[in-house]
Amino acid sequence: MKATVIAARFEPLMDDDEDVQSQPGWMLLAESDDERLDGPREFVSPRLWDNPMACYPLGSEVTVVCLPDDPREYVFELDRLPRPKTSLRGT
């Protein structure tokens, strides 16, 4: 479904938080009032390495895919974000 970007925010790592999902990073917030939902709903992306606003500015569309049996479970399709640079080292 299509959702509208409403904000991006940076979340720092808390001193006592060692969970991998709690790494510092940017999160994209989007809202949809798709008819398959029970009213308007806000979605929050997983943490991202870089500020996503260059690729997903306020008011732009982003795709969110919800599980048909449980719309509380969802993923963002962030195909406009640049791919992370990796290096392969030989031995």
Image (cartoon, rainbow, N blue to C red):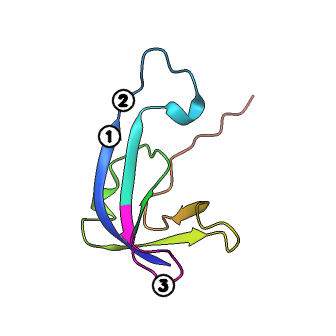
Left or right: 20 with respect to 35? Answer: right
Left or right: 82 with respect to 65? Answer: left
Q: Dot 3 lies on which element?
A: loop
Q: Could you tell me if the residues under marks 2 and 1 are in contact, i.e. CB atoms within 8 Å?
A: yes
Tag of residue 57:
none
Tag of residue 35:
3
Residue picked out by circle 1: 10
Neighbor class of circle 1 (other Cα within 10 Å; few <14, some 14-19, many 20+) is some
Please tell me whether mark 3 or mark 1 is closer to you in this view: 3
The earlier-in-sequence mark between 2 and 3 is 2
Q: Residue at x 39, y 72 (%)?
A: 40
Image spot of residue 65 (x, y percent): 57, 71
Q: Quadrant of the C terminus?
A: top right
Q: Dot 2 lies on which element?
A: loop
The residue segment tinted magenta is 30-40
What amino acid is at disc 1? Phe
What amino acid is at disc 2? Pro
- Does the magenta segment cover residue 34? yes
Rendering quarter of residue 72:
bottom right
What whole-number distance in Å separates the C-alpha atoms at marks 3 and 1? 30 Å
Q: Is residue 57 above or below residue 11?
A: below
- Does the magenta segment cover residue 5? no
What amino acid is at disc 3? Glu
Image spot of residue 39 (x, y percent): 42, 74
Left or right: 55 with respect to 77? Answer: left
